[in-house]
């Protein structure tokens, strides 16, 4: 059964290829959703897939790409979306 989370990543997460990293990890885990830079300097988005893949995805968010310095990842479960394909930025 698919679940969907919204997430917000704080720290040094803009200008360090965080969105590309996130898309790569999400696609490798067969997740759908999106990621974007927010005006407050965070990275936000939504991801949908099975629980195991979402857990691995959040672990990747906590690590980030090499140049990132992640302070915190907040997530919450939200309603799943039907008919979505791919993971975009």
Image (cartoon, rainbow, N blue to C red):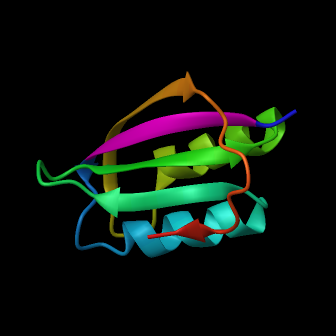
* Rendered location of residue 75, percent (x, y): 47, 29
**Vertical relation: 56 (above or below) 33:** above
* Rendered location of residue 5, percent (x, y): 57, 34
Residue sitting at x 45%, y 66%: 65
* Rendered location of residue 70, percent (x, y): 34, 47
**Vertical relation: 62 (above or below) 35:** above
The magenta segment is: 3-10
Q: Nearer the viewer, residue 8 or 3?
A: 3
Q: Quadrant of residue 35?
A: bottom left
Residue sitting at x 61%, y 28%: 79
Left or right, residue 5 beside residue 41? right
Residue sitting at x 65%, y 61%: 26
* Rendered location of residue 88, percent (x, y): 52, 70
Left or right, residue 85 beside residue 88? right
Quadrant assignment for the C terminus? bottom left
Q: Nearer the viewer, residue 56 or 84?
A: 84
Q: Main secondary structure of the magenta part?
A: strand
Quadrant assignment for the N terminus? top right
Residue sitting at x 64%, y 64%: 25
Q: Quadrant of residue 33?
A: bottom right
């Amino acid at each position: 059964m698919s679940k969907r989370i919204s997430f917000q990543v704080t720290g040094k997460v803009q200008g360090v290829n965080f969105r590309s990293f996130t898309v790569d990890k999400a696609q490798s885990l067969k997740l759908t959703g999106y990621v974007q830079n927010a005006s407050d300097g965070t990275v936000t988005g939504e991801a949908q897939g099975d629980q195991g893949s979402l857990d691995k995805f959040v672990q990747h968010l906590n690590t980030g790409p090499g140049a990132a310095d992640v302070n915190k990842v907040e997530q919450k479960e939200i309603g799943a979306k039907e008919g979505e394909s791919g993971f975009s930025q």
